[in-house]
Image: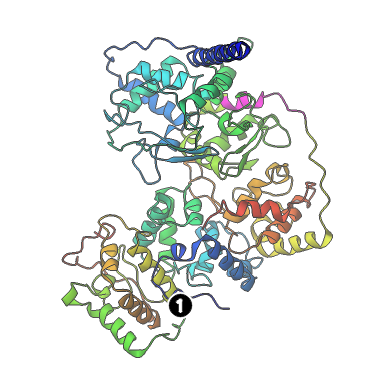
C-alpha cells in the first residue's frame, strides 16, 4: 500500500514537472506585453507593411473565396481537421481593432493570440517568428489601415485531442522555438536579406520542408521538399539537383519565375501559382534577387536512389505513346520539346522525372493555368483530363513521358492515379 | 451513346452523389475514347492566339466552345461576354460550384477572364438542330406559354421578358435560352432552386426558379430545348428591367 502511494506521488510529481516544463517552454522568448497608446502610423510605414503583407502572402489564407480581403474565413484543411483563418481587418470585436502592436508581435513571434491562447501552427509562426519587431510593427500598421469588415470568426473544426490547448502546448514544447532571424556575418547583406525573406515572411518551409506525423517540419530551414498536407501536391526539394534546386540556374531565371510564373527553366502551377500570383510577383527586383542568391546557396542534398520498381510493361508504354500522340503531342511536341513561352518541355524536365509523381497526376487530371501576372498576363493553359482519361490511361501516358526522350524515371501505376482522383472533385 | 437523363429538376451533383458521378464519368469516357480535343490534335500547328491560349476549355466545352459531347458542358460560343465573365467570376469566387472550373480559373485575372469571354462571345458558329421533344404535346404547349407569356395570376414573368422575345439573350449579361440541351437547363434551374447556383445579389433568377412548380419547370425546359435556333441568332439590345425583379447580374 505504502509503495503504491509512493509510486502515485512520484507519478504526480513527474506529471507536474512535465506540465511545468511544457508551460515554461511555451513562454520562452516572450517579452512582457506593454500596453500603451499606439503612435499614429505614417503613410510610409503603412506602405511598407502592405509590401511585407505581400511577402508573407497573408491574404492567401486570410481571405475567403469571393470574400472581403483580409476578413478571414478561409478553411485550411489539415490532417487534424479544418482551421479557419481569422479576420485581420481592424474590427474592434472580430478583427485586430482592439489589439496592440505588442500583442500582434507576440502572435507573430510567439504564436499566442491577444487573450494569450496558443495559436495553431497552420498560421505559420514557426516561420514568422523570424520576422523582426520593426517589420511586425509595419505589418500591424498596414492591417490597421484596412477598411473594417465585421465578419465574425469561425470556430475551428479540429478533432480531439488536437483541438485542445494542452495538446497544442505539448506540440509547441516539442517543435517550436521563438527566434528572430540572426544575420550570418560570413555571408553578404544580399544573402542575408534573401534568407530572411525565405525563412521568415516567405514561409517557404511551410510547404517545401517535410512534415512529421504531427505536422511539424523537422527542420524548418532545410527546404528538402514535402508533400503538402491534404492538397496532394508535392513541394519539391530546393536542395536537390534532381528536384527543384536552383544552384545551377542563372539568378535571372529564378527572379523571372518568381516575378512572372514562367521562365526558360520552369513554369509554376498549382499551389505555387497562388504564391506567385498573390505574393512574389509583387516583390521588388532587389528582394527577388536576394531570395535567388540565398536559394542558390542551399547546400546540395545527397542524391538518393529511388526505390527500385519494375520497369513498365512494353504494351503499357505503347498504350501511353498512343495516348501521348492523341492528347499531348499537339502542344508538348513529338520530342517532348514543348513550345517556348507557352508549353513547358517534358524532355529533361525535373518536374516530370523527379521521384514524387503526385504533381504529374494533378496536372493531367485537373489541368491548370500558370498565374496571370503582370509579366505574363495571358497564360496558356493545360486541359483537364479528369473526364477523358481513366486511371490506367493516365498512368500509361505518364509512364511513357517519364521513359522517353532521355527521361529515365520509374513508371506511374494505376494505383498512384486512383489514389489522387478524389482530390480532383468536379 | 446514352447518358442517364435527369428527369427530376435538381442540381445534378446533389442528385447523383459523388460515387454515382464517378461511375457516370467512367461510362462517359469509355463512350468517348476520342473527344473533340483529341480529334483536333495533331492537325493544327501552334499559333500565338487567344484560341490557342484557351484550349484548356475545349477539353469539356468542345472545339471553339461549341458545347461538350454530353448535356452538362454548355456551349460558350456566341453567348454575351458580360454573361460569360460573370459565370467565370462566380466559379472562381464560389457562387457557382464545379471544382475543375474553380481550379482552372483561380490563378487568372479579371482582365484575362474578360478577354476569354469576349473571344467566345465573338464566335459565330452554327447551332445543331434541336433534338425531338421527349414530352407530350400538351406539356410543350404549357412550356411555350410560360416561356413566352409567363403566368400573370402567379406573378410569374415570361422568360422572354429578360432573355429577349426571340429568346436569344440580351446584352450585356443575359444569355440566350435556345440551343441548350434539356438536361443542362434542368440542372441549372434545379441548382438555382436549391441554392447551388447563385448570381450576383439580388438574384432574380433564383427568385423566378423558386416560383416554378417542378412540372412547369420541365415543361419550359422541354419546349426551350425543342426549339430551333434562328439563323444569325445574336443577343439583342439591353432590355428594360421587369417590375418586381431586381437583378444584380443584369442591372
User: Which residue bears the numbered disc 1?
Assistant: B126
In the displayed structure, does residue B127 sit left or right of residue B208? right
Q: Which residues are magenta?
A: A291-302
Residue A91 part of the magenta-drawn span: no
Tell me if residue A13 comes above or below residue B216 in the rendering: above
Front position in the image: A78 or B163: A78
Front position in the image: A420 or B226: A420
Chain assignment, label 1: B
Q: How is the image coloured?
A: rainbow
Tell me if residue A381 comes above or below residue A31 in the rendering: below
Q: Quadrant of residue A141?
A: top left
Task: Indicate the position of residue A209 as horizontal and vertical percent values.
Answer: 62, 30
Number of dots carrying numbers: 1
Front position in the image: B94 or B119: B94
Q: Quadrant of residue B188?
A: bottom left
Q: Quadrant of residue A261?
A: top right
**Would residue A286 be seen by someone viewing this image from the given angle?**
no
**Which residue occupies the extreme bottom position in the image?**
B137
Task: Indicate the position of residue B90 as horizontal and vertical percent values.
Answer: 38, 54
| Residue at 67% over, 24% down | A298
Front position in the image: A37 or B59: A37
Secondary structure, mark 1, is loop
Task: Indicate the position of residue B119 as horizontal and vertical percent values.
Answer: 44, 62
**Would you call the spot at circle 1 few (<14 residues within 10 Å), some (14-19), or many (20 or more)?**
some
Q: For the N terminus of chain B, which image quadrant?
A: bottom right
Tell me if residue B144 comes above or below residue A126 in the rendering: below
Q: For the C terminus of chain B, which image quadrant?
A: bottom left
**Which residue occupies the extreme front position in the image?**
A1
Task: Indicate the position of residue B29 as horizontal and vertical percent values.
Answer: 61, 68
Tell me if residue A342 comes above or below residue A72 in the rendering: below
**Would residue A305 be seen by someone viewing this image from the given angle?**
yes
In the displayed structure, does residue A221 sit left or right of residue B99? right
Amino acid at each position: 500500500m505504502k509503495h503504491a502511494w509512493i509510486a502515485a506521488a512520484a507519478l504526480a510529481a513527474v506529471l507536474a514537472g512535465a506540465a511545468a516544463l511544457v508551460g515554461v517552454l511555451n513562454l520562452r522568448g516572450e517579452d512582457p506585453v506593454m500596453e500603451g497608446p499606439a503612435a499614429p502610423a505614417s503613410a510610409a510605414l503603412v506602405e511598407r507593411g502592405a509590401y511585407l503583407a505581400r511577402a508573407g502572402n497573408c491574404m492567401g489564407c486570410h481571405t475567403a473565396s469571393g470574400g472581403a480581403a483580409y476578413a478571414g474565413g478561409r478553411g485550411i484543411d489539415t490532417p487534424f481537421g479544418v482551421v479557419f483563418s481569422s479576420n485581420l481587418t481592424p474590427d474592434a470585436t472580430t478583427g485586430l481593432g482592439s489589439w496592440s502592436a505588442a500583442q500582434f508581435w507576440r502572435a507573430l513571434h510567439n504564436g499566442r493570440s491577444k487573450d494569450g491562447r496558443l495559436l495553431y501552427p497552420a498560421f505559420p509562426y514557426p516561420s514568422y517568428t523570424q520576422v523582426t519587431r520593426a517589420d511586425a510593427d509595419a505589418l500591424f500598421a498596414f492591417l490597421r489601415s484596412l477598411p473594417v469588415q465585421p465578419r465574425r470568426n469561425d470556430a475551428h473544426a479540429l478533432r480531439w485531442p488536437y483541438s485542445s490547448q494542452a495538446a497544442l502546448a505539448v506540440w509547441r514544447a516539442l517543435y517550436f522555438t521563438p527566434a528572430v532571424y540572426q544575420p550570418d556575418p560570413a555571408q553578404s547583406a544580399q544573402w542575408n536579406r534573401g534568407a530572411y525573406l525565405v525563412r521568415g515572411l516567405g514561409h517557404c518551409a511551410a510547404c517545401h520542408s517535410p512534415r512529421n506525423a504531427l505536422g511539424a517540419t523537422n527542420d524548418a530551414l532545410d527546404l528538402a521538399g514535402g508533400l503538402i498536407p491534404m492538397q496532394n501536391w508535392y513541394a519539391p526539394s530546393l536542395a536537390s539537383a534532381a528536384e527543384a534546386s536552383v544552384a545551377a540556374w542563372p539568378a535571372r531565371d529564378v527572379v523571372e519565375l518568381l516575378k512572372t510564373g514562367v521562365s526558360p527553366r520552369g513554369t509554376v502551377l498549382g499551389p505555387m501559382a497562388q504564391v506567385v500570383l498573390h505574393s512574389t510577383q509583387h516583390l521588388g527586383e532587389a528582394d527577388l534577387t536576394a531570395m535567388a542568391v540565398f536559394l542558390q546557396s542551399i547546400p546540395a542534398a545527397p542524391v538518393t536512389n529511388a526505390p527500385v520498381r519494375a520497369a513498365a510493361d512494353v504494351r503499357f508504354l505503347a498504350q501511353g505513346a498512343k495516348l501521348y500522340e492523341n492528347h499531348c503531342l499537339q502542344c508538348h511536341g513529338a520530342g517532348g520539346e514543348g513550345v517556348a513561352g507557352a508549353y513547358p518541355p517534358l524532355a529533361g524536365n525535373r518536374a516530370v522525372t523527379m521521384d514524387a509523381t503526385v504533381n504529374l497526376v494533378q496536372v493531367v487530371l485537373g489541368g491548370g493555368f500558370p498565374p496571370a501576372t503582370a509579366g505574363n498576363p495571358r497564360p496558356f493553359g493545360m486541359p483537364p483530363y479528369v473526364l477523358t482519361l481513366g486511371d490506367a490511361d493516365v498512368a500509361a501516358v505518364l509512364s511513357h513521358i517519364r521513359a522517353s526522350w532521355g527521361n529515365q524515371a520509374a513508371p506511374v501505376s494505376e494505383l498512384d492515379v486512383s489514389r489522387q482522383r478524389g482530390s480532383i472533385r468536379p | 451513346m446514352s447518358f442517364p437523363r435527369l428527369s427530376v429538376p435538381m442540381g445534378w451533383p446533389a442528385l447523383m452523389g459523388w460515387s454515382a458521378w464517378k461511375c457516370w464519368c467512367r461510362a462517359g469516357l469509355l463512350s468517348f475514347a476520342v473527344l473533340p480535343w483529341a480529334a483536333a490534335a495533331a492537325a493544327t500547328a501552334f499559333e500565338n492566339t487567344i484560341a490557342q491560349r484557351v484550349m484548356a476549355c475545349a477539353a469539356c466545352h468542345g472545339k471553339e466552345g461549341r458545347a461538350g459531347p454530353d448535356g452538362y458542358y454548355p456551349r460558350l460560343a456566341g453567348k454575351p461576354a458580360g454573361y460569360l465573365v460573370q459565370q467565370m467570376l462566380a466559379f472562381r469566387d464560389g457562387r457557382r460550384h464545379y471544382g475543375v472550373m474553380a481550379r482552372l480559373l483561380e490563378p487568372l485575372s479579371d482582365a484575362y477572364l474578360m478577354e476569354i469571354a469576349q473571344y467566345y462571345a465573338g464566335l459565330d458558329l452554327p447551332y445543331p438542330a434541336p433534338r425531338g421533344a421527349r414530352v407530350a404535346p400538351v406539356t410543350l404547349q404549357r412550356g411555350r406559354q410560360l416561356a413566352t407569356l409567363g403566368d400573370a395570376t402567379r406573378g410569374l414573368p415570361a422568360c422572354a421578358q429578360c432573355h429577349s422575345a426571340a429568346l436569344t439573350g440580351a446584352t450585356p449579361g443575359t444569355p440566350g435560352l435556345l440551343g441548350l440541351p434539356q438536361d443542362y437547363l434542368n440542372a441549372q434551374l434545379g441548382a438555382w432552386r436549391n441554392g447551388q447556383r447563385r448570381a450576383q445579389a439580388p438574384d432574380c433568377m433564383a427568385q423566378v426558379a423558386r416560383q416554378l412548380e417542378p412540372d412547369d419547370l420541365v415543361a419550359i425546359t422541354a419546349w426551350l430545348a425543342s426549339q430551333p435556333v434562328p439563323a444569325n441568332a445574336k443577343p439583342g439590345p439591353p432590355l428594360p428591367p421587369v417590375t418586381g425583379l431586381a437583378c444584380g447580374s443584369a442591372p
